[in-house]
Image: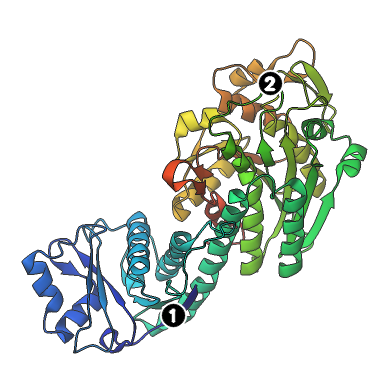
């Protein structure tokens, strides 16, 4: 999609479609009022007849009006003017994109950035509109032979601003919004690929390509290199697969050499059959999404590189498959992690923590200011929080608070869960330093407690995205979460949010 910023008089805009806001109680946005006066009250007449009430999400498309150079007007209801919010801006943007696509309108001018939202400036609104527009236009038909006809699809959006003093800010917001949107969509694309294509080696190749395109440093460790590092926990998971594991390291150096980096660790299980503790066959195809943590971290790295974020950020993605095989982990096996701690594997389907723990130990060498891991780790987190919020666990409450605030600002919400010693006791093993599961109770918490044993050297947070990383049913597909949250957090750390 092409985007541009424009200012001027609304009634003089040449466009295939002007997108204007109408509120409840016969209220209009500033630009809608100007257009209404220019057209001798055409919008007022529609409101009085009840053709549009201003209810949030309501849409009316008008054909050409003789007094305007624009070809059409699209009126979108925004609800109560006093209660209009960032979430409602997302909703109406999605509704407008859908209507424009259905109507085969390939260019439109949006007057939505002018809408006032408490706590949101024009830059934030422009970013938000672009990110939502790109999200709504995303198509997962790359592997279909009969692709959707894009010849009449929406190709250009002009974002109108009324104040010339905001022009430079708006143009920067356009760049930032496109960068974040690209990161979200990259995470979705990687997540939606099937396991026979998106293997650990494929994921590593994508990371190397990304590094070349955006001048980042990439390092890929194969299994021999991981053996030298004594990553026995990670390598135990890949033993049941014909696909070799990879440890992917991407480095964005936007800060000073002396600045300690933030490390993002993303679980990259490109397919999870559960190993010997095999999963039920129903919906097992969705286990291609078990690498969405890794995909979101890679997507975030693309976004911050495109933004040229002045911050040092390192991504680590341990990538493997978890398959049943004669050499696969067996319940009762004991493996030694890179940290030297031993793990009794009571359930081979609790494999994400086995690959993450070695990656978290590896992260220590970078002397990080903070480490955040992102993983589709537990079904228990889905039970606890559903599909609306990612779970946050942390050994440092201020870091957890930063992430939760970033989630609120970016509309990619998260919620803090406990990380108490009471739960850690459930990991006791009679034969090893710990078990890899803590029993049926509080599974998301005990999984985080397991990871916490490998993160004592630095400030750390764990995001469990098992409920938020993808959708099932008719809308099945990766969501790209939590790229927006991570970008917001990193922008905050760089002093830009």
Report which quarter residue 87 is drawn in: bottom left
Give the residue at mark 1: 5
**Does 338 sit above or below residue 435?**
below
Residue located at (47% from left, 28% from top): 383
Of mark 1 and mark 2, the one earlier in the sequence is 1
Q: Name the colour scheme.
A: rainbow
In this image, 78 relative to 265: left or right? Answer: left
* Relative image position of residue 366 (x, y in whole percent): 80, 49
**Does 477 sit above or below residue 23?**
above
In this image, 339 relative to 304: left or right? Answer: right
Report which quarter residue 492 is drawn in: bottom right
Give the residue at mark 2: 347
Q: Nearer the viewer, residue 225 or 487?
A: 225
* Relative image position of residue 327 (x, y in whole percent): 83, 26
Q: Residue reaching furthest left?
A: 49
- Give the class, few, some or many, for how many residues have Cα within 10 Å of label 1's Cα (few <14, many ≥20): some
* Relative image position of residue 351 (x, y in whole percent): 70, 30
Q: Nearer the viewer, residue 478 or 377?
A: 478
Q: Please, what secondary structure does the residue beneath circle 2 have? A: loop
Residue located at (80% from left, 38% from top): 242
Q: Residue 335 has which mark?
A: none
Question: Cβ–Cβ below 8 Å for labels 1 and 2?
Answer: no
Q: Residue reaching furthest front?
A: 145
In this image, 11 relative to 231: left or right? Answer: left
Residue located at (49% from left, 80% from top): 168
């Amino acid at each position: 999609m092409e985007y541009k910023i424009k200012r001027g008089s609304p009634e003089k805009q040449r466009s295939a479609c002007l997108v204007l806001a109408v509120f409840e109680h016969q209220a209009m946005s500033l630009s809608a009022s100007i257009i209404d006066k220019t057209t001798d009250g055409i919008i007022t007449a529609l409101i009085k007849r009840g053709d549009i009430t201003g209810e949030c999400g309501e849409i009316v498309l008008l054909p050409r009006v003789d007094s305007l150079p624009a070809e059409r007007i699209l009126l979108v209801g925004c609800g109560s003017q006093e209660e209009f919010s960032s979430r409602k801006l997302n909703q109406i943007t999605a509704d407008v994109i859908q209507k424009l696509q259905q109507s085969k309108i390939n260019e439109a001018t949006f007057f939505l950035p002018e809408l006032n939202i408490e706590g949101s400036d024009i830059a934030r609104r422009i970013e938000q509109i672009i990110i939502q527009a790109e999200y709504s236009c995303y198509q997962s038909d790359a592997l279909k032979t009969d692709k959707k006809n894009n010849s009449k699809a929406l190709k250009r959006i002009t974002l109108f601003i009324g104040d010339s003093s905001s022009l430079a800010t708006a143009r920067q917001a356009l760049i930032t919004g496109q960068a974040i949107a690209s990161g979200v969509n990259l995470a979705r694309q990687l997540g939606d690929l099937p396991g026979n294509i998106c293997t650990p080696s494929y994921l590593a190749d994508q990371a190397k390509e990304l590094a070349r395109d955006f001048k980042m440093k990439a390092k890929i460790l194969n299994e021999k290199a991981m053996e030298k590092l004594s990553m026995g926990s990670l390598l135990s998971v890949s033993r049941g697969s014909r696909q070799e594991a990879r440890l992917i390291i991407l480095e964005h150096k936007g800060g000073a050499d002396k600045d300690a980096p933030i490390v993002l660790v993303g679980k990259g299980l490109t397919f999870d059959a559960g190993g010997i503790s095999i999963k039920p066959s129903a919906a097992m195809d969705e286990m291609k999404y078990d690498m969405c943590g890794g995909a979101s971290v890679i997507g975030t790295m693309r976004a911050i590189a495109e933004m040229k974020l002045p911050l040092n950020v390192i991504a680590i993605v341990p990538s493997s498959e978890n398959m049943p095989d004669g050499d696969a982990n067996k319940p009762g096996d004991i493996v030694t992690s890179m940290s030297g701690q031993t793990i009794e594997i009571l359930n081979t389907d609790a494999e994400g923590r086995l690959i993450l723990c070695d990656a978290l130990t590896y992260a220590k060498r970078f002397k990080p200011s903070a480490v955040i891991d992102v993983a589709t780790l537990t079904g228990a987190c889905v039970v606890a929080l559903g599909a609306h919020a990612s779970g946050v666990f942390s050994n440092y409450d201020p870091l957890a608070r930063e992430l939760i605030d970033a989630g609120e600002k970016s509309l990619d919400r998260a919620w803090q869960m406990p990380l108490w010693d009471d739960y850690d006791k459930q990991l006791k093993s009679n034969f090893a330093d710990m078990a890899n599961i803590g029993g049926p109770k509080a599974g998301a918490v005990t999984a985080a407690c397991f990871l916490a044993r490998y993160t004592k050297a630095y400030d750390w947070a764990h995001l469990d995205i098992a409920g938020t990383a993808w959708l099932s049913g008719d809308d099945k597909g990766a969501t790209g979460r939590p790229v927006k949250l991570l970008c917001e957090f990193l922008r905050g750390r760089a002093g830009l949010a």
